[in-house]
Amino acid sequence: AQSVTQLGSHVSVSEGALVLLRCNYSSSVPPYLFWYVQYPNQGLQLLLKYTTGATLVKGINGFEAEFKKSETSFHLTKPSAHMSDAAEYFCAVGPSGGSYIPTFGRGTSLIVHP
Amino acid sequence: DAGVTQSPTHLIKTRGQQVTLRCSPKSGHDTVSWYQQALGQGPQFIFQYYEEEERQRGNFPDRFSGHQFPNYSSELNVNALLLGDSALYLCASSLDERPRETQYFGPGTRLLVL
């Protein structure tokens, strides 16, 4: 069984401030972890993913995330927010072996103030 | 290179009717997955098609069925529509069925059941 918890349905930051979106997961097998972004009236776009190897993963648009097994976390960060980062962000977990049925979190809406 | 395309973009149906949604994968991709995204929720995995067969299935009733054609395009069929089936239906394609492969999402079909 697997699950994803995204802490905070809404996160508000000022332009130029640090962005931190939290994701905790549970998985009975080593997980694959993903962050997606969804702009209004669009599909999801992959920001980054962790499969194996280096636990600090760099993605597009300046985002990065760190896989912390001991904390079962995969938080998404960006040093400096831009207005264009305002969107819905989803964390997802998928098992690395066996049947692949990904589980998504409920999403966090990032609001960026000028 | 065209990305994932879906049709129609919007659809209105009444309870009890049947609906067919269509998806064309990104060029070179042979695996198609379908997701249901209710308002304010993360996507939920419906099923995945690879080599014209349903390979994985999420927790959805048999009213949800699909098909994949030799050109890798896919259809999602929903019978006996319920009000609760109102959602954004997302199609995603990938190079193959391995869980580590990146999924590319289409813009979705928004279904409203009255």
Image: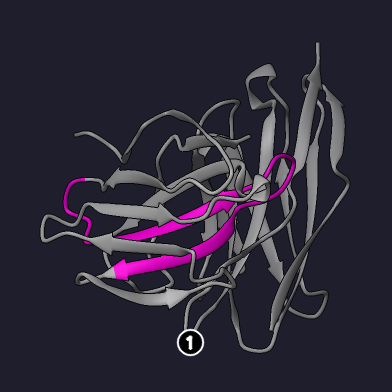
Residue projecting furthest to the front:
B16
B108 and A75: which is toward the camera = B108
Residue projecting furthest to the top:
A114
Does residue A86 lie above or below A93 as drawn?
Answer: above
Q: Over which residues does the magenta segment extend?
A: B27-49
A16 and B54: which is toward the camera = B54
Colour mapping used in the image: one colour
Q: Secondary structure at mark 1?
A: loop
Dot 1, crowdedness within 10 Å: few (<14), some or many (≥20)? few
Name the residue rendered at 61%, 49% in the picture.
Answer: B85
Residue B61, x across and y down, in percent: 55, 70
Q: Is residue B31 left or right of residue A95?
A: left
Q: Which residue is mark 1?
A: A97
Q: Pick the quarter of the image with the N terminus of chain B.
A: top left
Which amino acid type is marked by label 1? Gly
Name the residue rendered at 46%, 56% in the picture.
Answer: B79
Residue A36, x across and y down, in percent: 58, 47
- Residue B59 in magenta stretch: no
- Residue B41 in magenta stretch: yes
